[in-house]
Image (tube, rainbow, N blue to C red):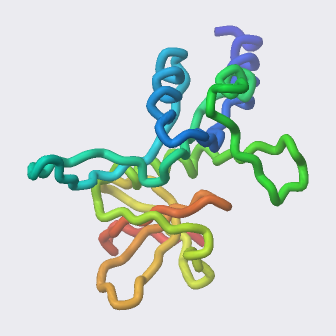
């Protein structure tokens, strides 16, 4: 590929972000996901297994950890047509920025780490912003195992012997997973 091709790829990647999106109706998530799949737009929604009972029989159902919230990867221009009136799908805006058109964007590395922790099948837990108090937490990087390369905060929970890694999506929430102390590298 020539130099102008490389510059075009870099410019395209600059426009590609993980946008925080929400669905507006209680049952429209499935339709929105189908439309995104049909258009080849990448998205992520953290799911958790839930045991349910129907007519006396137990089964496991996957449900969203946070209903009506999707992370969509693409350029704003490629996502905008799906947010038209009546689609029940819209960007989440950063109200603290003071700018009306400032969409909430998650950095690529933070989103990749979040996905890896959510998919690790460990004992994960979601923390809302008001629950996250990381002033005492040490920044760490995982070495080896399923979470190799994931960065987050080291947290010792009261009354728990296990160590916890918390990956925070600034302004949204955090997700935690139990980790082994020998797989932790401190970051200064």
| Residue 183 quadrant | bottom left
Q: Judge by depth and name the residue closer to the eye, 77 or 168.
A: 77
Q: Picture coordinates of residue 87 (x, y %)?
A: 63, 26
| Quadrant where the image shows the N terminus | top right
| Quadrant where the image shows the C terminus | bottom right
Residue visible at 64% across and 47% down?
Answer: 107
> Outermost residue, front direction?
55
Q: Picture coordinates of residue 132 (x, y %)?
A: 57, 74
| Residue 8 quadrant | top right
29 relative position to 110: left or right = left
Residue visible at 40% across and 65% down?
Answer: 125
| Residue 24 quadrant | top right
Q: Judge by depth and name the residue closer to the eye, 6 or 131.
A: 131
Residue visible at 55% across and 69% down?
Answer: 187
Q: Picture coordinates of residue 103 (x, y %)?
A: 76, 43
Is residue 10 at all visible to an observer of this figure?
Answer: no
């Amino acid at each position: 590929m020539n130099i102008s091709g490389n510059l075009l790829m870099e410019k395209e990647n600059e426009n590609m972000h993980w946008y925080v999106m929400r669905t507006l109706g209680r049952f429209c998530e499935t339709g929105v996901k189908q439309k995104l799949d049909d258009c080849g737009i990448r998205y992520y929604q953290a799911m958790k297994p839930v045991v349910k009972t129907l007519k006396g029989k137990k089964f496991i159902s996957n449900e969203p950890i946070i209903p009506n919230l999707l992370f969509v990867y693409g350029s704003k221009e490629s996502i905008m047509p799906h947010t038209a009136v009546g689609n029940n799908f819209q960007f989440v805006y950063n109200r603290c920025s003071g700018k009306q058109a400032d969409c909430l964007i998650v950095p690529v590395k933070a989103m990749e780490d979040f996905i890896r922790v959510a998919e690790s099948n460990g004992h994960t837990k979601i923390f809302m912003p008001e629950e996250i108090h990381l002033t005492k937490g040490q920044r760490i990087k995982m070495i080896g195992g399923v979470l190799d390369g994931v960065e987050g905060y080291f947290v010792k929970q009261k009354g728990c012997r296990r160590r916890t890694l918390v990956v925070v999506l600034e302004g949204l929430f955090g997700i935690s997973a139990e980790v082994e102390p020998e797989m932790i590298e401190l970051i200064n």
